Each structure stands twice: as C-alpha cells, then as structure tokens.
C-alpha cells in the first residue's frame, strides 16, 4: 500500500507480479483491455501455469495444477460472479480502488495479516468493486516448489496466513462472499485432522473385525468414487486438452498424466498428515515467519529425507499392520491410501532429482521457454 500511496501518482493500474512469476506482453495487454471496459473492476487476473520446472516433482506438480486450475477457475467464475478470489500476483489492479477500499486492519493480537490476497478481495467486494479471474493460463507463469520439503514449508506459511482469517469472519467491512471464501481457506487446513483421522479409525475398525460385513465391491467402488470426485477438475482439464484439435505431443502428455496422477495419489494422505502436524506446530507457536520459498533445484539427501519423513513412514507402517490384521484384502485395499506414507522418504529423494530435457516438455512449458529466450536476446 505504501507504493500506491506515494509512488503511483498519475497511474490508473498496476501489474502485480511475484518474485518468481512472469507474464507475456499479450497477456498484460489483454488484462488492460478488459479492465478498461469495466470501470467497476478492481482486480483482473489469469490462471497461472508453472514454469522453469527443474525437477520431476515441480514438473508433475505443475502439470496437474495447470490442468485443474482452468476448470476450477471456470466453475468459480460461474457461481461467484464479480466477487471472485484474488491470488496475490499475476494480476492487474485498479490503483484508486485499492487506495480507497483495500486497506487491511491490524489483527486483535497486534499482528499484520500474512495472506493479504483473500482479505483484500473481500474488502473490495464490500466496497462495491468487482474481482474477476480469466480462466485461461496462456501467458501467465510462476515457479512451483522444487521438492516435497519445499512444498510442505510453503504449506506451513499458507496455513499460518489462512488461520488468521478467523479474526475477520464477523466483520461487516469485508464482503459476505469474501468471508465465506476465507472460511473455506481456514477449513482447507482446519479439516485436515478430521480427514486424516479416518485412516487410523478405519485401521482400528478393520483390526477389530468391524468391516467384515462390508461388500468388497461396494468398498472398491466408494474408494474409486472418492478418488474421481477429489480429482474431477484435473481430470476434466486433462480430457479437454486431449480432445483439443491441433498438433502436440499427446504421448508425452499422457505419460505425464499417468505419472502426475500417481504422484497425486501418493501425496493425498501425506498432505493430510502433514497439515495435521502443521496445525499442531502453529498451536504450539512454532511458526518461524514468512521465509523465502526455495525455487532452484536442490538435492534432498536420504539422511535429510529420513529425518524429515521418518515419522510419516512409521505411522504408515502401524496403520498397515492394523489393516493386515483383518486379512490380505483389507491390506491390499489400504495400500493405495498408505503408499504415500510408506514411500515418503524415497519419494522426497527421487522426485527432487533434475528431470530430463525438453523432449518431455508439454506445450505450455515450451511456450514459456520460447518467450524467456526472446527476453534474454540482446537488442541492437
């Protein structure tokens, strides 16, 4: 806000970028043109794709996020209308709107709001301004975490910021839909312990014979249905890309899809446990601040991975033993859910290694690399 108050005189709009994000010239011009047609529009942003993926983890993580975000953003735009979310960067903002209505309060405990984006959007909603997302990610990029420890370190920061929203839910100077969006952000982390608790409870139920009457076919169907529903935006995005006319390497995309879905399956339970531990750390006051996110590829050693994820592996082994007491079928059914915990150490090490070259890139990665090369080309 200091920049807008003291250094933005004479300007109508400002382009907000993160330290690791970029946008193409065409995308910026498109944002400006759309904003100029609507004087009530305070924030306009595009869906963001990953760039510069130097590790297998970053590439696969970005692949799934890219294909799921466009579908998810389209659905959000349909029911939220002009009161959509703000992601904090890769966006065009109207300076006058921010100066007048996007100032954030100091929290009751004297601290400042860490995750400013949702709160600023909610303040603008209350001021009568529109906040919109263009559900397209052509020409808008950022870097994703390069490895599993970096992902969970970012999660700790986001959780600390999201949980602060609890102080804002009853304030009338934040829009109603914006407050609902902040409640969703709180529950994204707050429900993790309940979600993870289903696993040890299921293991205990299986070990004590409580699931003997459950039809096996119905159980498998429910597990498959849960997987499909939780990944529906991403699956729809993959389907849309594969059905799109044009020449691109569908074989490369299909291989990436299979690998990404496997990674997502492994991360599912691992994230639930990690977010439960994150809430415990924050409750004990162990948040260390909003540190800079690692962006470059780095080696995750076996010793570091064992120290970081040893407890996760032990928890997975205990629950697998519980399911095994109910028989081989229960143990086999639990494996897709528990594999992320059991393999967390090798997963952290192997996915942090540099990926292979450009022959495995998908069209969006190649497009960004081409723009980056043009930007580095010297002018005469």
Image (cartoon, rainbow, N blue to C red):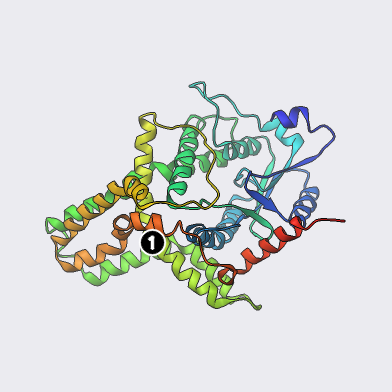
Compared with 312, 70 (above or below) is: below
Q: Please tell me how crowded label 1 is: few (under 14), some (14-19), or many (20+) other residues with Cα within 10 Å.
A: some
Residue occupying the point 31% across, 65% down = 222
Instruction: Name which quarter of the figure residue 265 lies in.
Output: bottom left
Instruction: Name which quarter of the figure residue 241 lies in.
Output: bottom right
Q: Is residue 183 visible?
A: no
Compared with 304, 321 (above or below) is: below
Compared with 346, 217 (above or below) is: below
Which residue of the protein is positioned furthest toward the right in this rendering? 380
Q: How many marks?
A: 1
Residue 295, position in %: x, y?
55, 48
Q: Nearer the viewer, residue 296 or 219?
A: 296
Name the image quarter holding the C terminus: bottom right
Residue 342, position in %: x, y?
29, 57
Residue 369, position in %: x, y?
67, 62
Residue occupying the point 22% across, 70% down = 216
Q: Nearer the viewer, residue 133 or 321?
A: 321
Left or right side of 292 for 129:
right
Residue occupying the point 81% across, 39% down = 12
Name the image quarter holding the N terminus: top right
Q: Nearer the viewer, residue 214 or 369?
A: 369
Residue 78, position in %: x, y?
60, 56
Q: Nearer the viewer, residue 9 or 375?
A: 375
Residue occupying the point 76% across, 48% down = 35
What residue does disc 1 label? 265
Left or right side of 323 for 260:
right
Q: Is residue 46 visible?
A: yes
Left or right side of 79 for 278:
left
Secondary structure at numbered mark 1? helix
């Amino acid at each position: 806000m200091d920049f807008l108050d003291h250094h933005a005189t004479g300007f109508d709009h400002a382009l907000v970028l993160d330290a690791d994000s970029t946008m193409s010239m065409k995308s910026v011009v498109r944002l400006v043109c759309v904003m100029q047609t609507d004087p009530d529009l305070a924030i306009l942003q595009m869906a963001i794709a990953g760039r510069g993926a130097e590790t297998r983890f970053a590439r696969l993580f970005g692949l799934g996020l890219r294909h799921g975000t466009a579908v998810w953003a389209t659905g959000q735009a349909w029911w939220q209308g002009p009161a959509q979310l703000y992601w904090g960067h890769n966006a065009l903002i109207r300076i006058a709107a921010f100066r007048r209505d996007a100032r954030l309060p100091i929290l009751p405990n004297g601290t400042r709001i860490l995750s400013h984006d949702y709160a600023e959007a909610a303040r603008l909603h209350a001021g009568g301004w529109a906040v919109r997302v263009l559900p397209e990610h052509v020409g808008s990029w950022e870097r994703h975490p390069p490895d599993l420890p970096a992902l969970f370190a970012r999660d700790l920061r986001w959780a600390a910021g999201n949980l602060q929203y609890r102080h804002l839910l009853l304030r009338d100077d934040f829009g109603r839909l914006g407050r609902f969006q902040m409640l969703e952000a709180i529950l994204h982390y707050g429900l993790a312990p309940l979600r993870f608790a289903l696993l040890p409870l299921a293991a205990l139920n299986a070990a004590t014979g409580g699931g003997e009457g459950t039809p096996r076919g119905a159980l498998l169907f429910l597990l498959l249905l849960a997987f499909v529903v939780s990944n529906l935006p991403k699956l729809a995005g993959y389907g849309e890309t594969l059905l799109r006319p044009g020449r691109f390497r569908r074989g490369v995309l299909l291989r990436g899809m299979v690998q990404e879905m496997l990674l997502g399956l492994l991360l599912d339970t691992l994230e639930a446990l990690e977010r439960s531990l994150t809430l415990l750390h924050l409750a004990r006051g162990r948040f260390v601040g909003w540190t800079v996110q690692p962006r470059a590829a780095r080696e995750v050693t076996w010793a570091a991975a064992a120290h970081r994820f040893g407890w996760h592996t032990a928890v997975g082994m205990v629950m697998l033993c519980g399911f095994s007491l109910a028989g081989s079928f229960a143990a086999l059914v639990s494996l897709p859910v528990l594999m992320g915990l059991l393999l967390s150490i090798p997963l952290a090490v192997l996915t942090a290694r540099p990926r292979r070259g450009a022959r495995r890139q998908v069209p969006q990665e190649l497009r960004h690399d081409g723009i980056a090369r043009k930007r580095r080309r010297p002018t005469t």
